Image (spheres, rainbow, N blue to C red):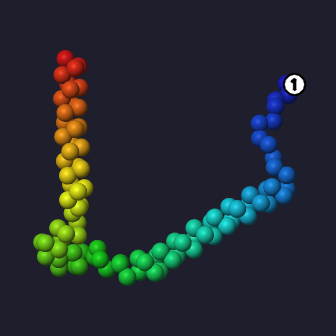
Amino acid sequence: MVDLPVLISVPNGEQLDEDIEVVAMKTFMDNVCRQVVDRHILADLRHIFLPTTVMDFTGDELLRRASEPQSQQSHRVSYMELVRGLRTILAESSR
């Protein structure tokens, strides 16, 4: 019979207790943060994306709320031009 080395080290009891406490505290803080965000930040915003609310928006309101800022749009255009240029170079080099 061949003895295999132990690949998993078992921490001592105190270290295990500390690790469990750390995980429990992180879980608790995650739950608290989710509740705060849900109850105090998102609670008043639930009506924003209801179909009836969106249908009442004018064209300008809808465009203002749903569109990207101009700076973001210009970045997108320049990146798309870069992608087109790179694809052209790739196509020409693979001929």
Considering only vertical position in the picture, is 10 above or below 55?
above
Q: Determine the residue located farthest toward the top in the rendered image.
A: 95
Residue 13, quarter of picture = bottom right
Image quarter in which the C terminus is found: top left
Horizontal placement of 79 versus 24: left or right? left
Residue closest to the eye, 31 or 86 = 86
Mark 1 burial class by Cα count in 10 Å: few <14, some 14-19, many 20+: few
Horizontal placement of 52 versus 28: left or right? left
Q: Position of residue 16 (x, y in %)?
A: 79, 56
The residue under the point 23% across, 32% down is 86
Q: Which residue is mark 1?
A: 1
Horizontal placement of 3 versus 53: left or right? right
Q: Position of residue 66 (x, y in %)?
A: 23, 66
Considering only vertical position in the picture, is 87 above or below 38?
above
The residue under the point 63% across, 64% down is 26
Residue 3, quarter of picture = top right
Residue 27, quarter of picture = bottom right
* Mark 1 secondary-structure assignment: loop
Residue closest to the eye, 1 or 38 = 38
The residue under the point 22% across, 38% down is 82
Residue closest to the eye, 67 or 70 = 70
| Residue type at numbered disc 1 | Met
